[in-house]
Image: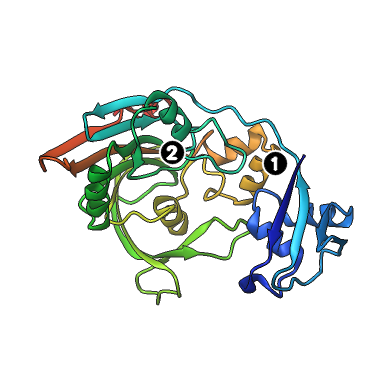
């Protein structure tokens, strides 16, 4: 067991303790937090409390968390391109980029530190754990600064492949806003079309979707990103009514995500999701080399679960 302590900040004063803990640790459901509180496993300022207890600023919440074995992840990544400034990785699905939650050592970051121990690696872009494909890194601070500036100015162009549920139109050019929505899972984001007024804190986003093939109630899309917002593709396609196959969070039912993290997802659930992972692949990237400004175009090979589309 690992004992943790959290000091309540002013912005969380007045919240119920079960709501606060569920927001902070979304992998544990609110009902599970309520059970832990009722059993006396959570305390405020050293005292047992109720789940309905309202928090005050500077309250100290303490609880014990079981340290579970780290899940296995994919181990082998590919190197698509490398020189003195750049490193472009082909990341497999089921490999998180950074340590987070239950993932500590089985991450791309940890593997790169092991394999490039004498080089300071800087991530320029990131993709989700289940997403496969290209990850761009810089091997020195000068290159990292230039590439981050290119990202900020939308000068690095990325294309994805996505398998979605439903028969997608030939082409959609989608502009709108993305932000925190009203979901059972805190990290899930929502998309609003451009004709809706943006909500406070929401970001503009722009994606183009080209339908390449349709088969068996599924569609294969090429996706061009003009902005790089977190969960942009997944949230946009979910709002359009074409969720990505295999996506537990943005798929046909977000409760699948809660079942997945609890280890309760079943084979029939996967069949309903139409895939065993979020079917999204970072396929191509186009950028200017940070040293000589030559254009570089790179492509990640199709993973095995995309081969059925015979591209």
Residue 208 image offset from top left, x and y in percent: 28, 53
Query: Mark 1 highlights which residue?
Result: 262
What residue is shown at x 25% (from left), y 40% (from top)? Answer: 285
What residue is shown at x 48% (from left), y 23% (from top)? Answer: 75
Secondary structure of the residue carrying tag 2 is: loop
Residue 271 image offset from top left, x and y in percent: 58, 35
Q: Please tell me whether residue 79 is drawn above or below residue 153 in the rendered image.
A: above
Left or right of 177 on screen, residue 274: right
Seen from this angle, which residue lies furthest front?
Answer: 118
Secondary structure of the residue carrying tag 1 is: loop
What residue is shown at x 86% (from left), y 64% (from top)? Answer: 49
Query: Mark 2 highlights which residue?
Result: 131
Residue 309 image offset from top left, x and y in percent: 35, 30
Left or right of 47 on screen, residue 20: left
Left or right of 22 on screen, residue 208: left
Q: Please tell me whether residue 110 is drawn above or below residue 64 in the rendered image.
A: above
């Amino acid at each position: 067991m690992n004992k943790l302590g959290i000091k309540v900040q002013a912005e969380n004063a007045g919240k119920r303790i079960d709501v606060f803990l569920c927001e902070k640790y979304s992998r544990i459901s609110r009902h599970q937090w309520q059970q832990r509180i009722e059993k006396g496993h959570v305390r405020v300022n050293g005292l047992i409390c109720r789940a309905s207890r309202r928090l005050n600023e500077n309250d100290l919440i303490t609880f014990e968390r079981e340290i579970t074995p780290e899940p296995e992840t994919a181990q082998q990544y590919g190197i698509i391109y490398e020189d003195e400034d750049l490193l472009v990785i082909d990341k497999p699905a089921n490999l998180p980029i950074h340590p987070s939650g239950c993932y500590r050592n089985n991450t791309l970051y940890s593997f790169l530190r092991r394999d490039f121990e004498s080089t300071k690696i800087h991530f320029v872009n990131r993709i989700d754990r289940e997403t496969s494909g290209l990850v761009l890194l810089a091997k020195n601070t000068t290159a990292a600064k230039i590439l981050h500036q290119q990202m900020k100015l939308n000068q690095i162009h990325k294309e994805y492949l996505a398998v979605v549920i439903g028969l997608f139109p030939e082409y959609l050019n989608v502009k709108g806003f993305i932000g925190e929505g009203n979901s059972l899972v805190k990290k899930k984001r929502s998309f609003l079309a451009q004709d809706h007024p943006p909500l406070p804190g929401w970001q503009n986003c722009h994606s183009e979707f080209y339908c390449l093939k349709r088969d068996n109630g599924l569609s294969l899309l090429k996706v061009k990103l003009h902005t790089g917002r977190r969960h942009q593709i997944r949230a946009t396609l979910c709002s359009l009514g074409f969720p990505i196959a295999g996506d537990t969070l943005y798929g046909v039912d977000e409760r699948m995500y809660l079942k997945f993290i609890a280890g309760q997802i079943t084979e029939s659930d996967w069949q309903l999701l139409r895939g065993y992972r979020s079917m999204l692949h970072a396929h191509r990237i186009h950028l200017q080399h940070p040293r000589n400004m030559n254009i570089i175009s790179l492509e990640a090979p199709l993973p095995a679960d995309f081969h059925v589309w015979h591209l």
